[in-house]
Amino acid sequence: MTTALYAAILGLFFLVLSVNVVAKRRRFQIGIGSKGELCLERAIRVHANFAEYVPFALLLMFLAEYSGLAPLYLHLLGITLLLARLSHAWGVRQIKEPFKFRVFGMLVTFGVIALSALAIIVLYFVRFYIAR
């Protein structure tokens, strides 16, 4: 289960992002929202963006693995997703944001989602139509 390795690593990263939000909420004594605290807003968005995209990317990677995608390709997808999310998190957390890190992170995350989906489609057609 190659995807499980990346799910575990990204799960730990998600916890780091979660603790970062909690720490900033405690520091500013803000339970809900951000009350205009820019570094808290950025921490919330990094965390939320991760929660919005990573589970779906991992689901598609798992389905590609289940469909027969070779471990090498799954490792490439997993490493790429991890690097993308690190880049996105680092870029967005900066008050004077260098947009290239956010853009890189999102484009590469989209790429992992697209490649995983395409792999599932190709493997489906290979298995059920070409291999017969």
Image (cartoon, rainbow, N blue to C red):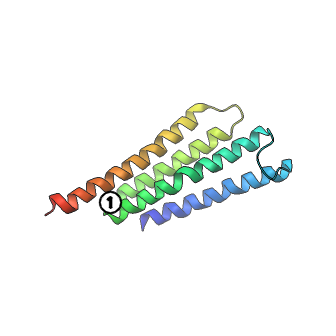
* The N terminus - image quarter: bottom left
Identify the residue shown where x is 81% and y is 41%.
35
The number of numbered discs placed on residues in the rendered structure image is: 1
Residue drawn at (70%, 46%) of the image: 43
Report whether 132 appears left or right of 86.
Answer: left
Which of the two residues, 4 or 57, is positioned nearer the viewer here? 57
**As drawn, is 124 to the left or to the right of 90?**
left
**Label 1 SS:** loop
Percent x, y of residue 79: 47, 52
Residues 74 and 113: in front is 113
Q: In the rendering, at what x and y percent does residue 15 appear?
A: 66, 59
Residue 44 located left or right of residue 26: left
Q: Residue at x 52, y 41 (%)?
A: 106
Point out the residue furthest to the front here.
32
Question: Which residue is found at the position 42% from the left and 52% from the top?
Answer: 77
Q: Decide if residue 20 is on the left or right side of residue 132.
A: right
Q: Which residue is mark 1?
A: 69
Density class for disc 1 (Cα within 10 Å; few <14, some 14-19, many ≥20) is: some
Give how far across and how far down residue 2 sits, in percent: 42, 64
Residue 32 image offset from top left, x and y in percent: 78, 51
User: From the image, which quarter does the C terminus lie in?
Assistant: bottom left
What amino acid is labelled 1 in the image? Answer: Leu
Q: Is residue 121 above or below residue 62?
A: above
Q: Is residue 37 above or below residue 77?
A: above
Residue at the extreme left: 132
Query: Does residue 115 sit above or below 66 in this rendering?
Result: above
